Amino acid sequence: MAKILLIDDDDDYREFIATGLRRNGHAVTVATSGLFLTAESGKADFGTTFEVIITDILMPDVDGLKVIRSVKAAYPPCKIIAISAGGRFNKSSVFLDLADAFGAEATLAKPFGILELCNAVDGMTRAA
């Protein structure tokens, strides 16, 4: 079981992912934007609270690239999985390549299967 923070502004997709992760034994906290980390980082070390952060890239307010940079600067051991459908640009590969360059340990293009996501999480937490 991993402690996961899931950040995605799409309500339906966020619920789909959270439900699938929970059914596979993971503890999941959800947030609708990267503002969650901005608010939490002043109160506690979120890196010790979560083993894995799954973040969408294209979100209002604080995007996933800023989330990745912030997490890696504050707590480098925290594992990050970046997810994206590419938004209106339909260029998920471009955004996921950027996420990889910014330090995400894994990237997944939407849509993806829960099993694929769980395998990525399990691989990261086993290696830790």
Image (cartoon, rainbow, N blue to C red):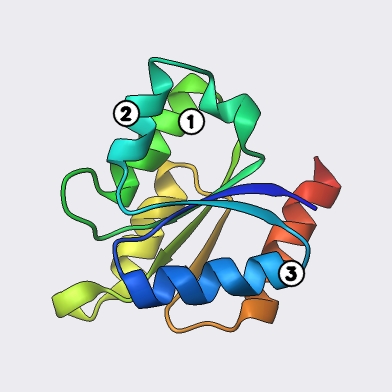
**Residue, x 23% and y 57% (percent of image)?**
59
How far across and down, in percent of the image, does residue 106 sit? 57, 58
Question: In this orientation, which residue lies closer to the viewer: 16 or 97?
Answer: 16
Q: Is residue 8 visible?
A: yes
Labelled pair 3, 2 in contact (Cβ < 8 Å): no
* Three-letter code, disc 2: Thr
Q: In the rendered view, tell whether residue 39 sits above or below residue 30.
A: above
The residue identified by callout 3 is 119
Question: In this orientation, which residue lies closer to the viewer: 89 or 48?
Answer: 48
Q: CA distance from mark 2 to mark 1?
A: 14 Å
**Residue, x 27% and y 73% (percent of image)?**
86
First-in-chain label (2 vs 1): 2
Closest to the camera, between mark 3 and mark 2, is: 2
Labelled pair 3, 1 in contact (Cβ < 8 Å): no
First-in-chain label (3 vs 2): 2
Q: What label sits on residue 72 in the rendered view? A: 1
Q: CA distance from mark 3 to mark 2?
A: 28 Å
* Three-letter code, disc 1: Lys
**Residue, x 42% and y 47% (percent of image)?**
101
Residue that extends furthest to the right in the rendered view of this protein? 126
Q: Residues within 10 Å of mark 3 (few under 14, many from 20)?
A: few
How far across and down, in percent of the image, does residue 60 sit? 17, 53
* In the displayed structure image, the side of residue 58 where residue 43 appears, left or right: right
Q: Is residue 76 visible?
A: no
**Which quarter of the figure has residue 92?**
bottom left
* In the displayed structure image, the side of residue 84 where residue 45 appears, left or right: right
Q: In the rendered view, tell whether residue 50 sits above or below residue 106.
A: above
Q: CA distance from mark 3 to mark 1?
A: 22 Å
Q: What label sits on residue 38 in the rendered view? A: 2
Question: In this orientation, which residue lies closer to the viewer: 50 or 95?
Answer: 50
